[in-house]
Image (cartoon, rainbow, N blue to C red):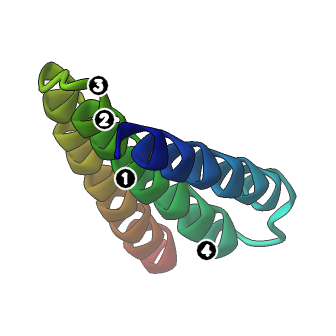
């Protein structure tokens, strides 16, 4: 079962790497932010699978911290966009 979880985690990392290309090439800030959310979500999923496969539950704390940072990044873009629209 651990091999399956590790292979699923590696597949998620590959998909997230492809999303990184979209992050770099996105024409608008909204495209870049959505790709950033993909990176955050994929990173959390890969870390959770890795933690369960390796029985390393401290990695779950890292994954949860990453999910909070991804949410704050999205919030910062939204609040920054509102601030720029008012100027």
SS class, disc 3? helix
**Mark 3 vs mark 1: which is more N-terminal?**
1
Q: Mark 2–mark 3 contact, CB under 8 Å?
A: yes
Q: Is residue 15 left or right of residue 55?
A: right
Q: What separation in Å lies between label 2 and label 4 (alpha carbons)?
A: 34 Å
Q: Identify the residue under disc 4.
A: 30
**Mark 2 vs mark 1: which is more N-terminal?**
1
Can the viewer see residue 73 in this picture? Answer: yes
Query: Of tags 4 and 1, which is closer to the observer?
Result: 1
**Which residue is pictured at 51% across the width and 53% down the height?**
8
Query: Of tags 2 and 4, which is closer to the observer?
Result: 2
Q: Identify the residue under disc 2.
A: 53
Residue 45 circle label:
1
**Which residue is pictured at 61% across the width and 74% down the height?**
30
Q: What separation in Å lies between label 2 and label 1 (alpha carbons)?
A: 12 Å
Q: Is residue 51 left or right of residue 26?
A: left
SS class, disc 1? helix
**Mark 3 vs mark 4: which is more N-terminal?**
4
> Which of the two residues, 45 or 24, is positioned nearer the viewer here?
45
**Which residue is pictured at 38% across the width and 62% down the height?**
74
SS class, disc 4? helix
**Mark 4 vs mark 1: which is more N-terminal?**
4
């Amino acid at each position: 079962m651990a091999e399956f979880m590790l292979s699923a985690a590696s597949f998620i990392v590959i998909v997230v790497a492809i999303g990184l290309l979209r992050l770099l090439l996105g024409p608008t800030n909204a495209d870049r932010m959505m790709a950033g959310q993909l990176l955050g979500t994929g990173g959390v999923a890969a870390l959770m699978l890795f933690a369960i496969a390796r029985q390393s539950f401290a990695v779950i704390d890292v994954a949860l911290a990453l999910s909070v940072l991804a949410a704050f990044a999205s919030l910062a873009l939204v609040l920054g966009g509102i601030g720029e629209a008012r100027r």
